[in-house]
Amino acid sequence: MNAFLLMIPFFLIRFGLLGLKNKAALNRAAYFAPLEGRERAAYLFYQVSNVLIFLYPFFLKVQTTPPGVWIGLALYLMGMVVLLLSTLAFAKPDQNGLNTGGVYRFSRNPMYVAYFLYFLGCAVLTRSWLLLLFLLVFQAAAHFIILAEERWCLGQFGSEYVSYRKRVRRYF
């Protein structure tokens, strides 16, 4: 099986479902907070690695021999579930626009956690070290994007975000 087929649920959930549930949330998810310093360089790595993560699987095949297939499938499915739950929660922000419900009660960035699990599952299923490398670059760069988002949230939501940040971890 061509590994690009693994990407279809991601696109259906991340863009299709989010667009169906809340078009404004789809636009919010595409917004990048203003970047400073190293965050600008990280943004470039983020975008390039993002493209590579989606295009490289066209050249890969899913490997179906144990135990890799079971480990990869477990990670892939966990990522899909967290992506589904975080997408549904993201579509329903609080009255002021802050996401604190659903899986956002456990992680301030469940979509990024979902991306990591999902694509780690893809890397294991394809047994591709290069896809894993692209994912690690993506995740490292995403951390700087998250820092910019947190700074933006602090300016946007003030003390409510400070309180949220104190009780909920950045990741898991």
Image (cartoon, rainbow, N blue to C red):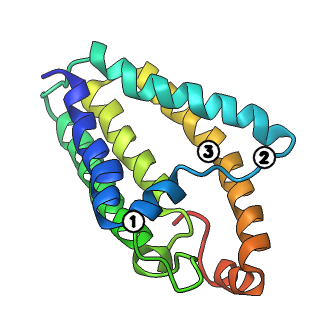
Q: Which mark is residue 86?
A: 1
Q: Which mark is residue 35?
A: 2
Which residue type carries mark 1?
Ser
Q: Quick one: SS at disc 1?
A: helix
Is 5 positioned to the left or the right of 153 in the image? left
Q: Which mark is residue 142?
A: 3
Residue 129: which quarter of the image?
A: top left
Please tell me which of labels 1 and 2 falls first in the chain: 2
Q: Residues within 10 Å of mark 3 (few under 14, many from 20)?
A: many
In three-dimensional space, the C-alpha distance between marks 3 and 2, rounded to whole angstroms, equals 12 Å
Which residue type carries mark 3?
Ala
In the displayed orientation, state which residue is furthest to the top: 59
Give whichever of 61, 25 is nearer the camera.
Answer: 25
Residue found at x 45% / y 46% = 116
Residue found at x 45% / y 57% = 111
Work out whether 35 lies above or below 69.
below
Is 45 positioned to the left or the right of 27 in the image? right
Of badges 3 and 2, the one in the foreground is: 2
Is 8 positioned to the left or the right of 47 in the image? left
Spot occupied by residue 156 in the image (x, y as percentages of width and height) = 73, 73
Q: Residues within 10 Å of mark 1 (few under 14, many from 20)?
A: many
